[in-house]
Image: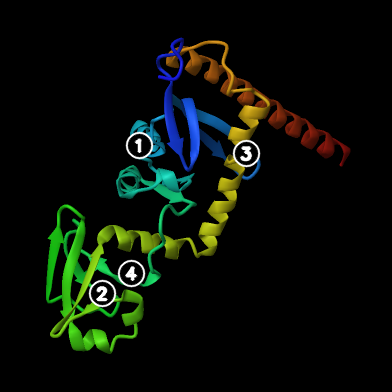
Amino acid sequence: MQNPSDPDATYRKKTGKETRGYSANLVETFDEENSLITDYQYDTSIRSDSSYLKEVINKMDVQKEQITIIADGAYGGKDNKTLATGNNINLITTDFQGKKPNEIFAEFVFSEDGKTLLSCADDQEPITSVYNEQTGQCRSKMNLERCLNCPHQQACNPKLQKKSAIIVISSKTVERAQQLQAMDTEEFREFAKSRNGVESLPSTLRRKYDVDKMPVRGRLRTKLYFGFKIAALNFRKLCKYYDSLVQRTQKLALE
């Protein structure tokens, strides 16, 4: 608790920055010309971005036609992607979190439960594959001669023993490597450009709507005031859209 007058406020240190109070998550729906904030969440500052996305997806029914949700890397993860896929949602995260794995691992194949390595980038099946519950990794024994002659040996970097080669890898590493591959496509770059427009919302809310200063205390009351500010921002977007319609009508009349 940072302030006796606001017992709901919490403290958090994220990406080296200290935050006190509350956090919010915005859902913006947009096309090539217009956008609108269609949902928002508000909670204590210790709540994770990933949990916000889970709530958004859970509130949505299974989509008849696939839709795309674009978010930054903090909203990703296997659980969120699986949940999104189940609702016919294409989840795209435009930022990569943590250390980047070698992209050769994208060619590795795991069993559906992620507990058995089925093949490596050279299509070699392991002699044995033992899963470690604590680390989430598989320790796989590979054919030594084939690893020595493999063009991917330096990238995979297996531990060479007298009779075999050992590689320790998790299905999570494979998924992260596949994500890196996907980020190197033209389609992904287009998604990233769309994501850049969303990044201006927090700055706009701070500069023009003063969301960092609330005249009330407590999570429920500050959430209500935050909602008022979202409504004001949407009203401004609506006015901008209406002005664009008027300009188009006038242009057509002149023609």
Q: Which residue is rendered at x = 44% and y = 20% of the image?
A: 2
- Residue 145 occupies quadrant: bottom left
Which comes sooner in the sequence, label 3 or label 4? Answer: 4
Q: Nearer the viewer, mark 2 or mark 1?
A: 2
Q: Residue 210 got which mark?
A: none
Q: Earlier in the sequence, mark 2 or mark 3?
A: 2
Q: Quadrant of the N terminus?
A: top left
Distance between the alpha carbons at the discs numbered 2 and 3? 42 Å
**Relative vertical location of residue 164 with respect to residue 138 in this rendering, above or below:** below
Secondary structure beneath dot 4 equals: helix
Q: Amino acid at mark 1?
A: Lys
Label pair 4/1, CB-CB below 8 angstroms = no
At 63% from the left and 34% from the top, the residue drawn is: 203
**Residue type marked 4:** Phe
The residue at which mark 2 appears reads as 120
Q: Which residue is mark 3?
A: 200
Q: Secondary structure at mark 2?
A: loop
For residue 105, the mark is 4
Apparent side of residue 151 relative to residue 188 in the rendered image (left or right):
left
Classify residue 84 as left or right of residue 133: right
The label on residue 54 is 1
- The three-letter code of the residue at mark 2 reads Cys
Q: Which is more N-terminal, label 4 or label 2?
A: 4
Between marks 2 and 1, how big is the CA–CA gap? 32 Å
Tell me the colour scheme of the image: rainbow
Label 2, residues with CA under 10 Å away: few <14, some 14-19, many ≥20: many
Tag count in the figure?
4
Q: Position of residue 51 (x, y in %)?
A: 36, 35
Q: Position of residue 196 (x, y in %)?
A: 59, 47
